[in-house]
């Protein structure tokens, strides 16, 4: 079988690579497409995977998203239609464009999703999918409200991160790439997704909430902050404000190892805080409302803190930095918890 993966955000290359490795062991062929956005394409370089880059992110307006999506549908449709053999399955993390192309070309879709709060992409992908693979921590009613049918639902008792973290070993070489050593203190940070359809109008003109959080943290923290901006505007604003206190990687690096050696991870989204916490590094998500999987991760003892306001995020960050010496015991506990969770890879393998 040929399995087509379409990747639209920086979380997905690691997840899809973990699935692809298992598929390849069974003799299946895989192919990857992505859009020109964030660190996605360079993550495939890091994984030593070939990827076809088709289309771009639509920016911060609904009109821009619509037009970019239409163009990407055209590019993907031509690419897939011109392949010598049509894929047998399409897998995405609710990619509206590739799901529409797969449906139009008669390719069944497996949608992996842990974000029912992203209602627009959910409504555009879930009704067109053969299966919806998701963490059982998310109530099924949320998928049904987005157009899913009972027979599509494929829950598993775990979190996505188990797929690529169960055998994780840190590599200190990544520190040298950023002129750091294991003796240095640093935080890993990522601003909120200010241009996502579910976050529009939540940001602050010209800045991100991360600016405000770091400004307060730097009053007592003497280490560096490694920041992964989502957009060029975020990058420029952060550089202007904090200068050489920040390290901004030019391309994808081994973020998993960065989390391991860091004092703290803090993000306005979910992916980085989830990954870092699952490695055992205390992490903060300042996403402005509760998210099912984040609440679940926190509830089972993984060190993820959901702080929905800037003030609470600052207060929690200072506490965690002061207690960073406790990280080794937290890490061992987290490793044990992760071993008891299911991976989405097994579910995907059952369905194909």
Image (cartoon, rainbow, N blue to C red):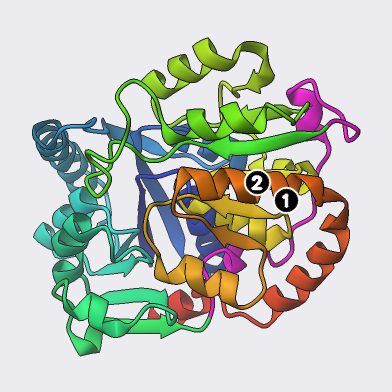
Q: How far apart are labels 2 and 1 at the CA level?
A: 5 Å
Observer-nearest of 190 and 72: 190
Identify residue for label 2.
317
Dominant SS type (magenta): loop
Q: Quadrant of residue 289?
A: bottom left
Q: For label 1, count other residues whose C-alpha is less than 10 Å away and answer few (under 14), some (14-19) or many (20+).
A: some
**What element does badge 1 sit on?**
helix
Left or right: 64 in relation to 243? left
Q: Which residues are magenta?
A: 158-184
Q: Is the Cβ of the residue at disc 2 closer than 8 Å to that at disc 1?
A: yes
Observer-nearest of 178 and 195: 195
Left or right: 64 in relation to 268? left
Q: Residue at x 50, y 20 (%)?
A: 238
Badge count:
2
Observer-nearest of 333 and 29: 333
- In percent of width and height, residue 203 lies at 31, 35
Identify residue for label 1.
320
Outermost residue toward the bottom in this view: 150
Q: Quadrant of residue 197?
A: top left
Query: Image height check: is 208 above or below 265?
Result: above
Residue 164 on the magenta segment: yes
Query: Image height check: is 103 above or below 181?
Result: below
Observer-nearest of 258 and 186: 186
- Image quadrant holding the C terminus, namely bottom left
Query: Image height check: is 328 above or below 254?
Result: below
- In percent of width and height, residue 348 lies at 44, 75
Q: Residue at x 41, y 40 (%)?
A: 192
Q: For label 2, count other residues whose C-alpha is less than 10 Å away and answer few (under 14), some (14-19) or many (20+).
A: many
Can residue 217 be seen?
yes
- In percent of width and height, residue 136 lies at 43, 82
**What element does badge 2 sit on?**
helix
- In percent of width and height, residue 50 lies at 48, 39
């Amino acid at each position: 079988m040929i399995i087509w993966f379409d990747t639209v955000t920086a979380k997905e290359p690691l997840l899809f690579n973990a699935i692809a490795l298992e598929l390849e062991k069974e003799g299946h062929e895989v192919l990857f497409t992505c859009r020109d956005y964030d660190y996605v394409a360079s993550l495939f370089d890091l994984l030593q995977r070939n990827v076809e880059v088709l289309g771009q992110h639509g920016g911060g307006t609904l009109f821009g998203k619509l037009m970019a999506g239409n163009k990407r549908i055209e590019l993907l449709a031509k690419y897939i239609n011109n392949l010598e053999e049509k894929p047998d399955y399409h897998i995405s993390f609710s990619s509206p464009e590739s799901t529409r192309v797969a449906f139009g070309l008669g390719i069944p879709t497996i949608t992996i999703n842990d974000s029912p709060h992203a209602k627009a992409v959910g409504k555009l992908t879930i009704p067109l999918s053969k299966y919806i693979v998701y963490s059982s921590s998310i109530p099924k009613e949320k998928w049904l409200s987005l157009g899913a049918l009972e027979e599509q639902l494929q829950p598993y008792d775990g979190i996505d991160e188990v797929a690529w973290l169960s055998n994780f070993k840190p590599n200190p070489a990544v520190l040298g790439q950023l002129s750091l050593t294991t003796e240095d203190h640093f935080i890993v940070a990522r601003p909120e997704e200010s241009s996502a359809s579910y976050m529009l109008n939540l940001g602050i003109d010209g800045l991100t909430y991360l600016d405000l959080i770091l400004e307060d943290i730097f009053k007592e923290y003497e280490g560096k902050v490694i920041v992964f901006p989502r957009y060029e505007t975020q990058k420029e604003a952060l550089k202007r404000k904090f200068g050489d206190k920040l390290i901004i990687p030019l391309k994808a690096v081994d973020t998993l190892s960065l989390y391991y050696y860091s004092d703290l991870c803090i993000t306005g989204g979910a992916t980085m805080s989830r990954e870092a916490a699952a490695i055992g590094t205390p992490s903060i998500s300042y996403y402005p409302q509760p998210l099912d999987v984040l609440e679940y991760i926190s509830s089972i003892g993984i060190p993820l803190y959901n702080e929905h306001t800037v003030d609470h995020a600052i207060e929690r960050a200072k506490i965690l930095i002061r207690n960073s010496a406790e990280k080794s015991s937290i890490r061992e506990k987290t490793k044990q918890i992760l071993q008891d969770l299911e991976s989405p890879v097994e579910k995907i393998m059952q369905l194909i």
